Amino acid sequence: MGLTANTRSLIDKAGLYRGGRLGKLSTRALLYVVLTASSILMIVPFVWMLSTSLKPDYQIFEFPPSWIPRELNWGNYVDAWQKARFSRYALNTAVYAVFSTLGQVTLCSMAGYSFARLRFPGQNALFVLVLATMMIPFQMLLIPLFVILKRWPLAGGNNIFGSGGTGLIDTLVGLTLPNTISAFGIFLIRQFSLTLPGELADAARMDGCSEATIFWRIMMPLMKPALTTLAIFAFQDSWNDFTWPLVITMTEKTRTLQLGLQTFQNQFFTEWGLLMAGTTITVFPLVVLFIIGQRYFVQGIALTGTKG
């Protein structure tokens, strides 16, 4: 007995459904394979750094290379910490990162909220101007920033007109000050502030609250996810910063960990074991920070990438 047209149609649809489902499963499996391979490629340099930091010198460049040291040389970490004066560099880096983060959280939250919720003449044009600064490479700002800080009035021996001394050059204030606000932070907070319920602010205004009270006591607590994201990004950027500390610091009293790693390199020789141990010490706080706040990293990227 032959199949009817309806029966053949149902069989064809079932086949298409199975084919489509298999196609989706194949695509997902391929995606997992690509992501796994990419993750392995990303983590290889980190694992190699850890391995090298624990190897004695004679094993670092042996061939074929080995991932696991035959003997654990923990002395590399002790030597790296003492030789490069890491205690001083770590303190400077912590001061730089913490105060830069506090500055960005405070100033960017006020500026971002103002652009999102307040109305003033030239608001959109000014916000576009702020966004445009994100396209200027930081290297182009190095000389103007250096000159401004060098001619800072009444600092570093300068007179009221900013002459006669070194200003804020080679100071922790000069190191931190330019990084206390960023266009990215303003943009991030502005985008998040647009999602906050405006009815709360309207009700507070009807109760007689000032704009400052509305911001600090009502809106600021609601911004906690965005502020946490901004704090993590700001701390990471400051901790990893190399270019600006290289320009603004002159002596060991203000140098940071990233500059301290240069201690293990010179024109003719590199102490790879100490360099990798020092790099591991430098990276460790950021790894801990990422593990604690990885959810906010993802939220921050999603917030700035999908909402305009």
Image (spheres, helix red, strand yellow):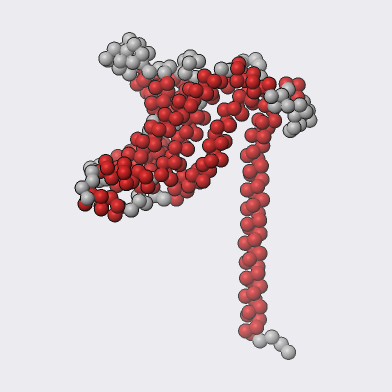
Residue at 65 percent across and 54 percent down: it is: 30
Tell which of 46 and 224 is nearer to you: 224
Q: Which of 229 and 288 is in front in this view?
A: 288
Q: In this view, does 276 lie to the left or right of 231?
A: right
Point 73% across, 21% down: residue: 57
Q: Can residue 260 be seen in this view?
A: no
Residue 190 in the image: state x and y as whole percent: 36, 44
Residue at image x 67%, y 26%?
Answer: 53
Q: Position of residue 255 (x, y in %)?
A: 49, 19
Q: Position of residue 307 (x, y in %)?
A: 41, 50
Is residue 229 visible from the viewing direction of this image? yes
| Residue 168 horizontal/vertical position (percent) | 38, 18
Residue at 45% across / 25% down in the picture?
A: 95
Task: Kindly indicate the quadrant of the structure image that contains residue 102.
Answer: top left
Q: In which quarter of the image is residue 37?
A: top right
Q: Quadrant of the N terminus?
A: bottom right
Judge from the rendering whether residue 263 lies leftward or rightward of residue 249; answer left or right: right
